[in-house]
């Protein structure tokens, strides 16, 4: 559901694996030659094992993911608001729907939250007294970009997250870095004339995305925007754990953020299907999914 950058990436990843997945349809609020109107998705319910939600986290997911579950579709999303997952608000919205429909939902199943969430659990399990930090970038943050795009007056946006050098040094030395002091959030925006002040204030006050962080808001023209950011999807993430005996420094780099996010969602879709078969219903975060369910048994066994 959704046919922006992430939706297109999910389509490509599904088509690479025809022995495992069948693409039933691409559902969107805007009908085209490639898409089906979202309002018609219930007509396809009996053919759909998993609905991959590819809309925005800031506005669409809290409304649409519970709706999909309520009408009887099990879901996988890459919801990226860590705070709303941690405090249970987002999970509770979906839990109410899965309780009624008996569906299965895996939330935050991208590369972070998602893959790196699982890595953090393992790190904390084997190094319980370590200092743990996660840093992002440099690169495109899809969730933060979509959050800016949701602001009235914004025509185009591109948000680059850059890890602060002092935060990297501190994390590598086993010092806990406050999450608001880890990154520089560089926002590049094409806006409607006269809306710059209101847009800036909205960005700086946005909880979980920009508030209390180091933020740079840059308003540029459409020509410069296209020259700088067309097909620029690279990103990175880094999980660092340090104790008095060991250091784990996992760095993840990608040329295309949507493509890696889609790969993660597809893996968790496989797990979701197996969970349904085992009558595991309800809402699960990525770290609550048994890793063995992410791949086929013969692959897992052969590589032991």
Image: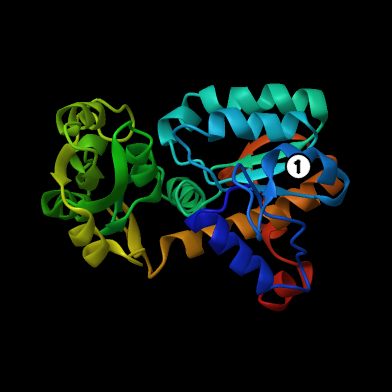
Residue 249 shows in the view: no
Does 91 sit left or right of 157 as displayed? right
Residue 202 shows in the view: yes
Q: Which residue is mark 1?
A: 41
Q: Residue at x 45, y 41 (%)?
A: 80
Q: Residue at x 65, y 53 (%)?
A: 268
Instruction: Measuring from the top left, give residue 214's x and y in whole percent.
Output: 15, 39
Residue that sits furthest to the left in the current view: 166
Place residue 247 in its image quadrant: bottom left
Where's the C terminus, which quadrant?
bottom right
Compared to residue 110, the image places residue 279 above or below, namely above
Place residue 281 in its image quadrant: top right
Q: Residue at x 61, y 41 (%)?
A: 29
Instruction: Measuring from the top left, give residue 14's x and y in whole percent.
Output: 67, 66
Compared to residue 69, the image places residue 17 above or below, namely below
| Element assignment for label 1 | helix
Does 49 sit left or right of 208 as displayed? right
Instruction: Measuring from the top left, give residue 210's x and y in whole percent.
Output: 26, 34
Does 275 sit left or right of 90 as displayed? right
Colour option used: rainbow
Residue that sits furthest to the bottom in the current view: 302
Instruction: Measuring from the top left, give residue 118's x and y in whole percent.
Output: 51, 50
Callout 1 crowding tier (Cα within 10 Å): few <14, some 14–19, many ≥20: some
């Amino acid at each position: 559901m959704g046919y922006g950058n992430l939706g297109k990436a999910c389509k490509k990843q599904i088509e690479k694996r025809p022995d495992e997945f069948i693409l039933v349809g691409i559902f969107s609020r805007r009908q085209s030659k490639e898409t089906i109107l979202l309002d018609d998705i219930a007509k396809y319910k009996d053919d759909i094992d998993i609905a991959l939600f590819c809309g925005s986290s800031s506005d669409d997911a809290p409304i649409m993911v519970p709706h999909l579950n309520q009408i009887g579709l099990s879901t996988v999303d890459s919801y990226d608001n860590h705070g709303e997952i941690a405090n249970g608000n987002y999970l509770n919205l979906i839990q109410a729907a899965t309780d009624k429909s008996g569906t299965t939902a895996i939330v935050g199943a991208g590369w972070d939250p998602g893959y790196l969430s699982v890595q953090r659990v393992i790190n904390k399990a084997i190094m319980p007294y370590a200092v743990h930090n996660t840093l992002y970038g440099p690169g495109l943050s899809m969730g933060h970009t979509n959050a800016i795009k949701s602001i009235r007056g914004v025509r185009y946006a591109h948000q680059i997250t850059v890890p602060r050098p002092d935060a990297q040094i501190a994390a590598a030395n086993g010092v806990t870095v406050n999450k608001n002091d880890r990154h520089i959030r560089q926002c590049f925006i094409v806006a409607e004339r006269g809306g710059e002040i209101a847009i800036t204030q909205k960005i700086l006050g946005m909880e979980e995305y920009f508030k209390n962080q180091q933020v740079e808001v840059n308003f540029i023209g459409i020509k410069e925007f296209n020259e700088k950011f067309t097909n620029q999807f690279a990103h990175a993430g880094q999980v660092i754990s340090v104790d008095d005996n060991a250091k784990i420094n996992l760095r993840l780099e990608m040329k295309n953020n949507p493509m890696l996010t889609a790969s993660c969602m597809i893996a968790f879709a496989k797990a979701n299907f197996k969970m349904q078969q085992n009558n595991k219903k309800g809402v699960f975060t990525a770290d609550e999914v048994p890793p063995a369910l992410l791949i086929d048994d013969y692959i897992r066994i052969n590589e032991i």
